[in-house]
Amino acid sequence: MSHASTLIESDIESYLKQHEHKDLLRFITCGSVDDGKSTFIGRLLHDSALVYEDQLAAVRRDSTRYGTTGDEIDLALLVDGLQSEREQGITIDVAYRYFSTERRKFIIADTPGHEQYTRNMATGASTAQLAVILVDARNGVQVQTRRHSYICSLLGIRHMLLAVNKMDLVDWDEATYEAIRTEYTTFANRLGIPHVRCVPLSALQGDNVVRPSERMPWYDGPTLMELLETVEVKAERNLRDLRLPVQTVLRPRHDFRGFAGTLAAGVARPGDPVVVLPRGQRSHIARIVTYEGDLQQAFPPQAVTLTLSDEIDISRGDLLCDPQHPATVADAVDARLVWMAERPLQPGRRYDVKLATTTLPAVVERVYHRIDVNSLEHHPTETLALNEIGLCRVQFTAPVAFDPYEEIPGTGAFIVIDRMSHHTVGAGMITRAATERAGADTEVPRRQPLLSKAQRAAQKGQRPCVVWLTGLSGSGKSTLANALEQALFRQGYHSYLIDAGNVRHGLSHDLDFSRDARAENVRRIAETATMFVDAGLIVVCAALSPYRDDRAMVRERLEPGEFIEVHVDAPLALCQQRDSDGIYARAAAGEISGLPGIDIEYEAPEHPEVHIDTAHQGVEESVEAILRVLRAKGGLEQFD
Amino acid sequence: MQISAAKLTHLKELEAESIYIIREVAAEFENPVMLYSIGKDSSVMLRLALKAFSPGKPPFPLLHVDTTWKFREMIEFRERTAREVGMELIVHINQEGVEQGVSPFTHGSRVHTDVMKTQALKQAMERYRFDAAFGGARRDEEKSRAKERVYSFRDRHHRWDPKGQRPELWSLYNGRVHKGESMRIFPLSNWTELDIWQYIYLEGIPIVPLYFAAERPVVERDGTLIMVDDERMPLDDGESPRLEQVRFRTLGCYPLTGAVRSNAVTLPQIIQEMLLTRTSERQGRVIDHDAAGSMEEKKKEGYF
């Protein structure tokens, strides 16, 4: 055991030399409280002599208070970190532990095993190279064993160590172990996990964790620790296809322009050709610059700075690639998505996606199916709830460069960020570029009507569109919407007016005014308006719609140029004074809450097609302003 | 191609990970700052920042929250280091605390730490409108730190919510904050105490001489050796400092930092002593001795 090594005492400099050449292995431990996971980790730390005496004293003290092992010291308490967890006797988050032996340094991601913690396990697995899966020898392979293995394989872990724990409770019985080993190996093969090893052990008593067991003479394989020390995990890295996502551009002097980043794959050498995606510029690597001086080669996961032989415009988010084996560029992908937020995934809603060093808005167009993490069955679904995993179509707002996650995790993984709350709500692994539009293989097939939107519009002699009037309550949206529709009607156009207030009496009568419900209401209006546009109509919508994201979602549903956003603007004081619906008075009286402008923010449009100031512009003048824009956009051309 | 050569030692891998984190913060935040505590971890973090932006300089300043009770040698070291690396150094002192005469002796360690460290840090974050602050904390230091994220979100009141942490997958850090909120960034999360020392040794990183054993004037209080660093240290009747061969495993406010008897005068000797010793690093810090979860409580309040 390293820290008891006599070398430390006799020759510290040799010890340091040895320690300097250790490599690093990151692994995850999966299993529930009942499988003895915390005890197992405590045993690893304890038997590696890594536990300091003051920590041990604290654990002895805690053992009496929270322990579950009677008079014996409860090693699980070495690892259960937060106070609330210690009191409940469960692990609720990912905790990271560190230890080293003479051969390796280890980082353990310790994650809870229960189904409701799928997201924590995915988090822990995302950085792990190996998984230790614990099972209780008395129970054998359980539903949760399969779940843990599946999540690990989903996140790309290719090395599994099955620790058959609590062998002491089955009288060290070989047949019991063999049955579990056979069953698990068969299952792991089905998942396509290439490297599986099994060890019978007792974490409580220390058998085959670090010390070989004398009580299982029938097992002559390595201890779990020996496996951890010797498993070769680096051989699977992709060293062929250069990938360097640019993190930041360094310009310390006007004659130096360096592209700083961490290699995700491949080997970089001066003179090598590169292609910069997604735009496709080409150049060669000039230098590999580091603090210690230039390098002749760099490989993952080194953090370096490259200079190129040509002056080309590169910025954060660009991907330097091997031109022989470049990444894929597309604006839509299929990806496995793990949903991590309480609020379910909303297909069609705008999220931000961070992929390598690129961040951009994206929409999950649809969920093909949900994967039951226990049975691995696929179920059709519209959405994903917390801890659910599904295959989805993701549409980005611009082309991005990526690789399938299985091939290069560093350029195939992404996180999904909620634009309002800023929380990380999902984690995605790209399977392939989306080659056809979503919907092609849904369970309910889409049928293309024989008549097209263009034909219906041509019959009416107009270009259909949506004129979306947004603004505070009392700003004059409804008045203006009615005047506009009347003007259109008089001039012979075919139109329809959707007033959000009326929608709430029918189509949306089941919705309240929460954030989610407001989004859903806007979605319904958008769906309806899109159908009317398809029918060839000019649709005038009057909807407070306080959230920018919701309005952006409407714009995205329509074709370019079909969405005319009109900001009906008036000072809040004026709106309150008008108070046409008496709504401000009710808010003041405390009868209602969640009123935009009062207790929630109204997110004014940043670049509306039309801005109307109803404090200074009359109704006629305002209508004319909107018609002018419609004419300029070609919407009314055939009548002018 | 020689694939066998394409292998990094664990220290080089940790170094690469930290550089990535530091660059990511510089690229994504508007106004980051690096907390510089003058200790060994800060020294390593500073070196990593210099590496991350070489041949340029890190695009953020250093901030030292000065409690006015730091060892004199620390302050000298701070000034020298800032000069040598050529980065802007901001020193912030909680003037209200100074005016109220807050000190570890008069107010106790808890109040002193809260006013001069935690509150002072909040003041500095607000005054300069920093949206991200690097800290040198490591996950192996203490149990509640084991679950800390690399990007640790703090609300408008600088509070840490251990149960509301954002999931952190791969190296895809989510740096989104609303106005007034901020992020504490821990690029050394995956380093252990041994890694830090070994890196200092291999890289030849300068550290405060207090880490090395020397004869220093100390008094013994409740089993802890406290160095008498200046005349502000109140001595009990009949108590007089005596010279002992001691060194410090961690550095902080001198009245709150216990010395250990030691003869380690070189880095290998320090590492040897650390590996053979049977008490953990934070034992030397007076503030951790309180109830279980003491660090967790402090962090919820905004302590680093």
Image: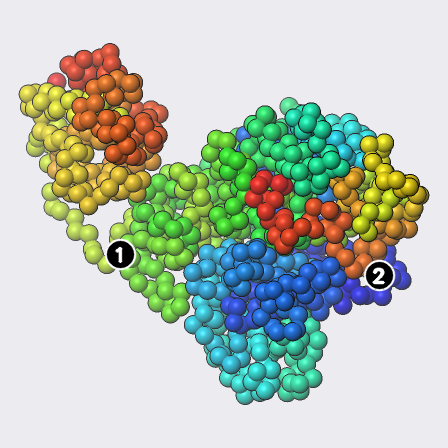
Q: Nearer the viewer, residue B223 or A626?
A: B223
Q: CA distance from mark 2 to mark 1?
A: 64 Å
Q: Which mark is residue A8?
A: 2
Q: Quadrant of residue A331?
A: top left
Pointer 1 residue: A441
Q: Is residue A121 left or right of residue A215?
A: left
Residue displayed at 75% across by 62% down: A53
Q: Is residue B256 left or right of residue A630?
A: right
Q: Residue furthest front?
A: B237
Q: Position of residue A311 (x, y in %)?
A: 57, 29
Q: Is residue A443 left or right of residue A279?
A: left
Q: Nearer the viewer, residue A306 or A3?
A: A3
Mark 2 residue crowding within 10 angstroms, few (<14) / some (14–19) / many (20+): many
Mark 2 residue element:
helix
In the rendered structure, which disc, 2 or 1, sits on the residue that comes first in sequence? 2
Q: Quadrant of residue B209?
A: top right
Residue type at tag 1: Asp
Chain of the residue on which disc 2 is drawn = A
Q: Nearer the viewer, mark 2 or mark 1?
A: 2
